[in-house]
Image (spheres, rainbow, N blue to C red):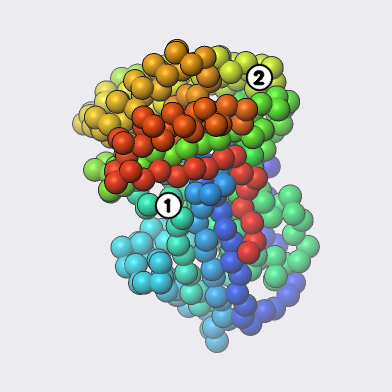
Amino acid sequence: MTIKDFIPSKYTHQIQQGKVTYKAPSNIALVKYWGKKADQIPANPSISFTLDACATTTTISYSKMNAKSNDFSFELLFDGEPKDDFRPKIEIFFSRIEPYLPFLKEFYLKIETSNSFPHSSGIASSASGMAALALGLMHIEKEINPAITDEHFNRKASFLARLGSGSACRSVEGDLIQWGSHNGTEGSSDLYAIKYPYAVHKVFQKYHDTILLVDKGQKQVSSTIGHKLMHNHPFAEQRFDQAHENLSKLKSILASGNLNDFIRIVESEALTLHAMMMTSIPYFILMKPNTLEIINRIWAFRASSGTHLCFTLDAGANVHVLYPENEKEVVYQFIKDELVAFCEKGQYICDRIGFGAKKV
């Protein structure tokens, strides 16, 4: 599909008002994307587990105005309170997607949103938030164009979400989602994410993710700025090549259930992501001392226990501990006994693979 496929033809129905709620999950990338081209196009492909408990719930109440406005008309409530500092990002998002949703300036929108996890702490709140918002807007479009198929609905929602936050395109569906053009993946696209189209061993189909909240505060460098620092980065091209290679390697690993090779790629990807941050100009570090302590304890426990837990990181200090269903009891006990002490106020989230966004 091309961009033109997401520009609608004439709408066939009229609506006056309505209300819709979507709950969209966050996701955790196994192969990371870091660096963007124009129009939120990724510099390299990525693949992620869709999560379940970490989610954003967004309600859109919409009403047709008497005349089309010159500006976008909306109010935004976060956890029931006005959130003015979110408005600029929503306005940028709306301006990007208006060519694909030309009805936007005809409606007044009340957007009420909340997260099940801390905002701006490295759990990709923008991913779940923008996915939920995009799905709600697609609901409105489907009301005025009922001919939209379910496949087109999800694909366009992913396309729109990407224009708000790149990784948001991976939060529309589940459970294993790939985004970015890759020669080894049929149907892959830079414009939207797809469900991983190849065989996946049963060991990966009920994976757990315990998220250790090392630092729940605002990151000192946003992901938006971090992505921009990949321009003229001395190791950028090598990193992009590495991501393509790791995605190719994962095909046989995911099919065979080889957990040791899975661990090597996932942990290498996490550390490479942060290495790109530490070697950009200007350089920065998002990991905290407790992040490193947790990583070292994971390595030691894996070696002594023979289990297959591993870690990954997003653009923040928090640690995602990944482990298979059949090891959940022993790994979870280890997490409680040794790792929770390094979390801020002892807080952590028990999550697992989910299956995409849901209309509530």
Identify the residue shown where x is 41% and y is 63%.
91
| Cβ–Cβ under 8 Å for marks 2 and 1 | no
* Circle on res. 257: 2
Q: Work out how far the residue at label 2 is from the one at label 1, CA to CA, in angstroms.
A: 30 Å
Tell me if residue 98 comes above or below residue 257 in the rendering: below
Identify the image quadrant of the C terminus.
bottom right
Q: Which amino acid does label 2 sit on?
A: Gly
Identify the image quadrant of the N terminus.
top right
Circle 2: is it few (<14), some (14-19), or many (20+) Cα within 10 Å? some
For the question of whether residue 106 can be seen, the reply is no
Tell me if residue 271 comes above or below residue 360 in the rendering: above
| Residue 138 percent location from the top left of the image | 63, 61
| Residue 292 percent location from the top left of the image | 30, 25
Query: Along the line of sight, which residue is nearer the eye, 153 or 329?
Result: 329
Labels 2 and 1: the sequence-earlier one: 1
Q: In which quarter of the image is residue 107?
A: bottom right
Identify the residue shown where x is 57% and y is 47%.
52
Identify the residue shown where x is 70% and y is 71%.
144
Question: Which residue in the protein does label 1 denote?
Answer: 117
Q: Helix or strand or loop: what does disc 2 sit on?
A: loop
Q: In which quarter of the image is residue 182?
A: top right
| Apparent side of residue 36 relative to residue 359 in the rendered image (left or right) | left
| Residue 160 percent location from the top left of the image | 56, 53
Circle 1: is it few (<14), some (14-19), or many (20+) Cα within 10 Å? some
Query: Along the line of sight, which residue is nearer the eye, 244 or 260?
Result: 260
| Apparent side of residue 354 relative to residue 290 in the rendered image (left or right) | right
For the question of whether residue 148 can be seen, the reply is yes
> Which residue of the protein is positioned furthest toward the left in this rendering?
282
| Residue 211 percent location from the top left of the image | 43, 39
Query: Along the line of sight, which residue is nearer the eye, 292 or 85?
Result: 292
Q: Which amino acid does label 1 sit on?
A: Phe
The number of numbered discs placed on residues in the rendered structure image is: 2
